Amino acid sequence: MNIGTIFMKICNMSLTATYCIAAVILIRLLLRKQPKIFSYILWSVVLFRLLCPVSVTGNYSLLRMDTDMISQENFSGFKGARIVALLNRDSVMDGNIPEVNGDGINGVRAVTEESSFYEQEAVRLLHKVFTVGGWIWICGIIFLAAHCLWTTVRFRKFLQGASRMEDDVYEMDGLATPFVFGIVRPRIYLPLMMQEKDRSFVLEHEYVHIARKDYLVKILAWGTVCLHWFNPVVWIAYKLMERDMEMSCDEAVVRKLGYDVRKDYSRALLSLSGGRMRLGGCPIAFGEGTVKNRVRNILSYHKRAVVTVVFAALLICATVIGLSMNPVNASNDGTEEMSRFVRKYADAFCDREGDVLVGLYIDEDAAYENVIELDYVGEGYTFGYSSPWPHEYRFLIDVEEGHRDEGTAEIWYYAWTSDPHLTVWKEKIEFSRTPDGFRVTDSEIKWLDSISSEEEFMEAYRFVDEYWFPDYIENGFVVAINAQTQYDMEAGDGTDRNAMYRSPDTAAEWIFNLSGGVCMPTYNSRGQATVRFIFLDGSFVEIPMYDVNFGGYTSELDVVTGSGPAETINPQLWIPDIHVWNAKAP
């Protein structure tokens, strides 16, 4: 994942949090006469939205927005849904079934249909803008973190002159206001020569902060502000959260000491509100916040009726839960179920499970009409051949906007033979929802085993915005081909079943099932070549190839020649250069 993609995700999180901040501010106004602890708790959902990149999706969500508002699909104006699945059969058989998400290879994702040139340019511009913005965002975080660290070190050194009064309480000349400082073992620092009555109020206030771990909440909140420094609404939310923290702490002191101390507590607050202490831009003092509002809140604070407190608590719980859940995205509603259905169908096809496959059709007649060589043998259905055997597949699901109960899917099966050799089978299925779930209503399969034009080549080997073809090295084909070569040479009968791999042109023609044209190889460097295959209609494709045995990639072959010593050879074996090929995909 590149910096642009990460920054795009952060911006989406920040936009979602902005919505939540607006909702929290509105709820705060409704609860302005209730204990401030409720308002303080409300900010937890904002913190969750700003820090957690994932959330549960549900119908109860209070969000009325797209949580992935900034995306390629929205930017290009794409409507509807198209699901792309890039599956490896070994992963599927191991039970590692990917879900609908934003991943690429070996995942399932929503992508746009073939878009216009201007839409493609718009998407490219989007990625460029967010890549540049991502680096600016990183620089901002580094600056704020460095400033905070530098200020903290300086402040810690300054506090070394404080005198210990009792336990973790320290007194120091030059301090404008009391505060808590520290993480593992927080300490309370007081200005020198405080009046005894004021000191008792201050200590009660700071002890509440320590008991509630507010000093850790502030650090987490400040780090969150640094992460979303580009969003001014987040800075406003931080200040409001801090105000609610202080007011709820004031109320806790009043509840503990009694409501008759409100006037004395307010006078103590006013006497200590003349100065400010800041650490890395993060206010930490008892006297912080708007003193006028805090004093007004203290003087008006009284015991609330149980009914109103219960109502406020229920409202807070409903708000926090509702804002924590993502809404069901109408554009993707049902696509996850569709992708599971198509995977089940493709798995049954690859495993030749006739009974399962018939059960996925709308009825038995439709299955007999569409499934190749379907037959009922004994007590079950069977179909297909023993070889070639479909082993891997890719699929696309197209769903029209407003039609969530039906769709079409294109499935590319990659069928292997023991040679090893591969052919592509492309199946198109239509499916719709029934009381028993999705069922196939029609299907059509096409064998792409004789490619005679560029159009057929793209149909077989181009998948969305890249080429796709199995890697002969990762699949162990190179080892198998070399083993066959060694067997043929040891047999000594002149047979070379792998002769087509000895030059890049014949290898490309064989591997990609090309027909009706001519090959024109160009050797780029030692062990590398580009094969241009020109079809009879004048169209052509270019395939990068390389000799994997050049330079001793595979184990050398010892061949006995007559009665003499063993001769070590390293025959040529040309295969597609998959990485170069994909990099040049149109």
Image (cartoon, rainbow, N blue to C red):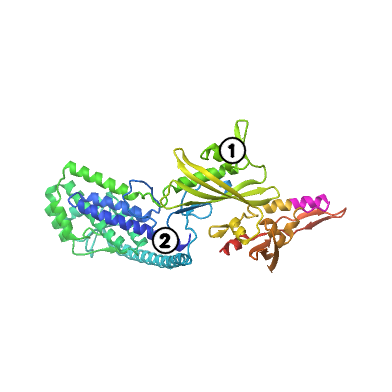
Per the rendered image, the range of residues in magenta is: 484-496
450, above or below 342, in the image? below
| Residue 440 point in image, percent of width and height | 51, 43
Residue 240 in view (yes/no): yes
> SS of the residue at dot 2?
loop
> SS of the residue at dot 1?
helix
Residue 122 covered by magenta stretch = no
Q: CA distance from mark 1 to mark 2?
A: 42 Å
Residue 354's disc number = 1
State the count of labels. Answer: 2
Residue plotted at (67% across, 42% down): 386
| Residue 164 point in image, percent of width and height | 26, 56
- Amino acid carrying mark 2 in the image: Gly
> Can you identify the residue that label 2 sits on?
77
Given residues 158 and 442, the one toward you in this image is: 442
- Amino acid carrying mark 1 in the image: Gly
Side of 7 relative to 390 (left or right): left
